[in-house]
Amino acid sequence: MVLLSRKAFPQRFVRPLALCAAALLPTEAEAVDCNWRGPPFHLTSAGPWPRATTLKSGQQCSARLRNFGRNVLRFRNIELYEAPKNGKVRLHENTRVSYVSRDGFEGLDQFTLRICGQENGVDGCTMIQYSVTVQGR
């Protein structure tokens, strides 16, 4: 790594270069939206609630856990109950879940999350089972 002094590298160029460098780094924002299909889930019903999506092999997708119904959800605990056999799942602190398949894998992969919290003020836990159809590039 080469460090440049302020004298050799005027300050007016620092910010534009920093922005260009940041644009080159891989970020979570590059992950496509998983676009999970399935009915709204309820924390007060055990499930498992199905979710499904289709991705290309090696492609990462990311989605925030949310219920599209009118219920107010407050998540307390989100855990990977059953890991995928042909990919990896990452649980983020902000209720975001990311999935990426093993490079070169094609076929069906599944994983299950166990989610606990409150739904409209009532404590409960549920399972959400995710099915991912992974296609070739």
Image (spheres, rainbow, N blue to C red):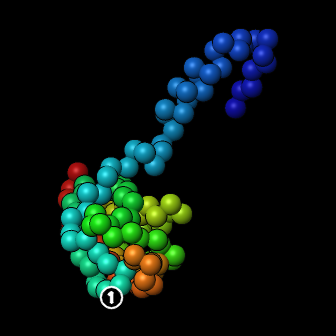
In the depicted structure, whether residue 25 falls above or below residue 116: above
> As drawn, which residue projects farthest toward the front?
121
Of 13 and 43, the residue lying toward us = 43
Say what amino acid the circle numbered 1 marks.
Ala
Instruction: Reply above or below: 61 against 22.
Output: below
Q: Is residue 128 left or right of residue 81?
A: left
State the image quarter where residue 89 is shown: bottom left
Tell me the quarter of the image containing the N terminus.
top right
- Residue 42 placement (x, y as % from top left): 32, 78
Return the residue found at the far bottom: 46
Residue at (21% x, 60% y) in the render: 54
- The quadrant in which residue 17 appears is top right
Is 14 on the left-hand or right-hand side of 85? Answer: right
Please tell me which residue lies in front, 56 or 37: 37
Horizontal placement of 1 versus 73: left or right? right
Near-viewer residue (134 or 104): 134
Against 102, residue 1 (above or below) is above
Q: What element carries label 1?
A: loop
Res. 92 in view: yes
Q: Where is residue 121, by image quadrant?
A: bottom left
Taking the spot 33% from the left edge, 88% from the top edge, the residue there is 46
x%, y% of residue 135?
20, 59
Q: How crowded is mark 1: few (under 14 residues within 10 Å), some or many (20 or more)?
A: some
**Image spot of residue 64 (x, y percent):** 39, 60
How far across and how far down the image is residue 132, in percent? 25, 67
The structure residue drawn at horizontal position 40% and vertical position 44%, both measured from the top left corner, is 30
The residue singled out by tag 1 in the image is: 46
